[in-house]
Amino acid sequence: MKYISTRGQAPELTFEQAMLTGLAVDGGLYVPATWPQLDKGQIAALAGKTYEETAFIVMKPFIGDTFPDDEFRAIIARAYAGFDHVARVPLVQIGANDFLLELHHGPTLAFKDVAMQLIGQMFEAALKRAGKRVTIVGATSGDTGSAAIEAFKGLDAVDVIILYPHGRVSEVQRRQMTTPDESNVHAVAMDGDFDDCQARLKDMFNDSDFREAVKLAGVNSINWARVLAQVVYYFTSAVALGAPHRKVSFTVPTGNFGDIFAAYVAKRMGLPIDRLVIATNQNDILHRTLTSGQHTKQGVTPSISPSMDIQVSSNFERLLFDLYHREGAAVAQLMAELGQGGFSLSQGARDALALEFDSGKCSEAETSATIKRMVKQTGQVLCPHSAVAVKVAQEQRGNPATPMIALATAHAAKFPDAVEAACGIRPDLPAHMADLFERPERVTRCTNDLSALESLIHEKIAR
Ligand SMILES: *Cc1c(COP(=O)(O)O)cnc(C)c1O
């Protein structure tokens, strides 16, 4: 499989190159040149397989011969061994034909672990083989950073620097990033919001001297390997509920558009998905795009679902590429307009978008009310992101005979204040991180300034 840039001006890469590179040199994102297909028989044959076996089958066409089959199976096994549930991503029933897909059984209690644990193992295997060393710089709204630090800490061939918006992540999220003491991982609290962190990260990738000097690599959800790892659970959950013989629908709490783009990939591969619903909090650029055809940035308003406090959803570019018939020049033009504040979708793109996706938004009050109602109706204590999904899923329910799966993207204990305020229950951290609040923190403050960040990174990786 070859990988091409959404802006059409970067060289084609192999899976391994695309994974180690992250962002393309033309500023675009890598996507596979074609969508591999699984036919009905192949999907039916996934029934009863373990998560790991399904992961191998779904991802294999995308990675080609990057790793020998045995090695790839071993990588997958190591990635998910640390999950605390044998099903890895269990389904829980919350209504007559409504389900939660629990994606928070990994080491940092959010769905980011599903991809990051796998990427950690793949980076290690690929870099070791090549005798190379890289510097991973990531921007996080909270959960990506802790998942990356957890997945890469202690590895020999990788330094990790994570930028998070100072004061805008939950205390649990912050401590998960600042308490690991391995010398190859570093948390940086930057002035500004998540979009500022992400913008500076993109600037670093566009600074070719810096990029080369530190061997910059990215593991944000712009990294194709992250999206790929997330495609797997759409297959496991749909098959558990009867696919390919019946369709299922998904509602995905959305920020950077990586998770729901993975659902779209599963659909392109042949998984019979009925409705694909984008759920946003009050930062609703994607919901506005679906309803008005205008993709226009507004300021970010902090919410109780902070991992979705985003107005520039990077992975939306991958969808635009398909909506504009894979014309890189058209995508480059739209992205330039977005830099000036926003763009309007063409009528054709708008129609194609509406064919694939529905959307809904959830206010702060509705998020809290949903947490409270779910405790009463099911005994489930949801994190605020998962509550956004449940609320929008019920609103966009559609055909009652079609199962609706809402993605539960984090454990409630990651957001204890918001959850307690909503339902009166203060969720406990699992035993393996019960002493999180006693561990010493290590973090560097930095201004929202490219050259300050670049010198800081040079300093951190100097040995
Ligand atoms: C990252 C995150 C999201 C948003 O996922 P995207 O792939 O960025 O759309 C939702 N919920 C939680 C808990 C997250 O950590």
Image: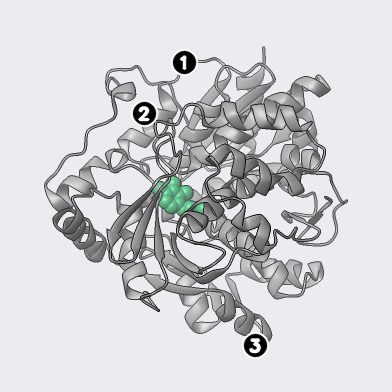
Instruction: Check disc 1 and give the amino acid type.
Output: Asp
In primary-sequence order, the first of circles 3 and 1 is: 1
Q: Quick check: 435 above or below 392?
A: above
The tag on residue 181 is 1
Residue 193 visible to the viewer: no
The picture quadrant where one finds residue 29 is bottom right
Return the residue found at the far right: 11
Return the residue found at the far left: 424
Q: Residues within 10 Å of mark 1 (few under 14, many from 20)?
A: some
Which residue bears the numbered disc 3?
Answer: 347
The tag on residue 343 is none
Residue in view at x 73 percent, y 69 percent: 331
Instruction: Check disc 2 and give the amino acid type.
Output: Arg
Q: Quick check: 310 above or below 452?
A: below
Residue in view at x 36 percent, y 28 percent: 175
Instruction: Check disc 3 and give the amino acid type.
Output: Gln
Percent position of residue 194, x then y: 48, 49
Element under disc 3: helix
Q: Is residue 459 left or right of residue 185?
A: right
Percent position of residue 333, x then y: 74, 71
In primary-sequence order, the first of circles 1 and 2 is: 2
Element under disc 2: helix
Element under disc 1: loop
Q: Is residue 371 left or right of residue 82?
A: left
Which residue bears the numbered disc 2?
Answer: 175
Percent position of residue 41, x then y: 67, 59
Q: Is residue 134 left or right of residue 435?
A: right
Percent position of residue 321, x then y: 72, 67
